[in-house]
Amino acid sequence: MAVQSPTTQAPGATGVFPAVRHRRLRRTEGIRRLVREAVPRPSQLVLPMFAVEGSGVRQPVDALPGVARLSPDLLVDEARAAHAAGIGGVLLFGVTDHKDAVATSAHSDDGVVQQAVRALKAALPDLVVITDVCLCAYTDHGHCGLLDDDGEVANDASLEVLARTAVSHADAGADIVAPSDMMDGRVAAIRAGLDEAGHEGVAIMSYSAKYASAFYGPFREAAGSAPGHGDRRGYQMDPPNAREAVREVREDEAEGADMVMVKPAATYLDVIRAVREATDLPVAAYHVSGEYSMIKAAAERGWLDERRAMMETLTAVVRAGADIVITYAAVDAARWIQEEER
Ligand code: PBG
């Protein structure tokens, strides 16, 4: 008679040791591969890139090891290598000294993002180009919208500028625009602006559930977009709130978003899961600068194995329900995944 522990005989138990041995499916790499559940694909990874003006310009970002601000010519070279590695697309941010109170350079035809998009689309027509739509890198005060007379971020007055910015990105050839400002009503305003300009084919990936996170620190160094006064808690979400993320997602879906996003990713896996269950739209998750840099920093000190820690994190994001993962590690990860699949 086999030994049966009382716990395995509990009502509702699905198997009884020793007949059930979970370790049978973990014995060899061949078997482990066969039963693997959530495996990120290179084509679902999106690489964020930072565009600057000029040519031959490469400015490494200290706080983001492996990431540099690039002029359009070098951006094309790097995007070509990323495309060849099989990634799903790039997400473009502009970095500029041309700043004013009303973010004029965000929507100028020869703005930094507009130039970069044209260069990318000319050289790599099949590469999916997504542009970040926000004002914080173009306003002299560093906030994501325009300010009213009291220095508060003015919601409705910002919508028109955001829509103009999205239209200028679409005019330059962007496939998808991604508003990250967190103003209410921006998806509807951008959709209307795009349609009016004849861009009904351009999709909107909305940063629907974007939290006021400490993990954006390295990005703000890269983009030069830190707010000059105050913080972003008046428009970005409060980290304790998960139900509110579902409300944001439903609203964006109703306003015409084609995809929604949760950001950050690794510290918000429960939110990714809740959003996955609340919508049938594709769900993106942004593994943000601080989440990436803390793994890089620990790996530099020899405290973590970079490849394993990065892949475990990206796998967790996919397992939580993300269809698309935006990550600074996209190219390395794509190569690692291809190596494992060989
Ligand atoms: C712009 C924007 C930010 C990020 C993406 N778009 C910064 C912020 O909101 O302050 C952060 C991305 C990252 O940390 O990798 N609003």
Image: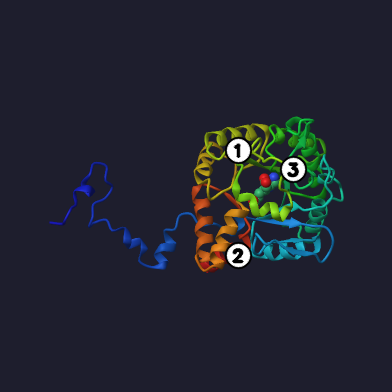
Q: Tell me if I can see residue 194 in this picture.
A: no
- Name the mark nearer the viewer: 3 or 2: 2
Alpha carbons under labels 1 and 2: distance apart:
31 Å
Residue 17 appears in which quarter of the rendering?
bottom left
Is 296 rendered above or below residue 94?
A: below
Counting from the top left corner in percent of width and height, residue 263 is at 60, 46
Mark 3 and mark 2 lie on one chain; the one further toward the N terminus is 3
- Pointer 2: what residue? 332
Q: Residues within 10 Å of mark 3 (few under 14, many from 20)?
A: few
**Front position in the image: 34 or 290:** 290
Nearer to the camera, 274 or 304: 304
Q: Which mark is residue 237?
A: 1
Query: Which is nearer the eye, 279 or 330?
Result: 330
Q: Earlier in the sequence, mark 1 or mark 2?
A: 1
Looking at the image, which residue sits at the far left? 1
The earlier-in-sequence mark between 3 and 1 is 3
Q: Relative to 20, is 145 above or below?
A: above
Q: CA distance from mark 3 to mark 1?
A: 30 Å
Give the labeled residue for mark 3: 201
Q: Is residue 21 above or below residue 278?
A: below
On the rendered structure, is 203 left or right of 286?
Answer: right
Residue drawn 76% across the image and 65% down it: 58
Give the secondary structure at mark 2. helix
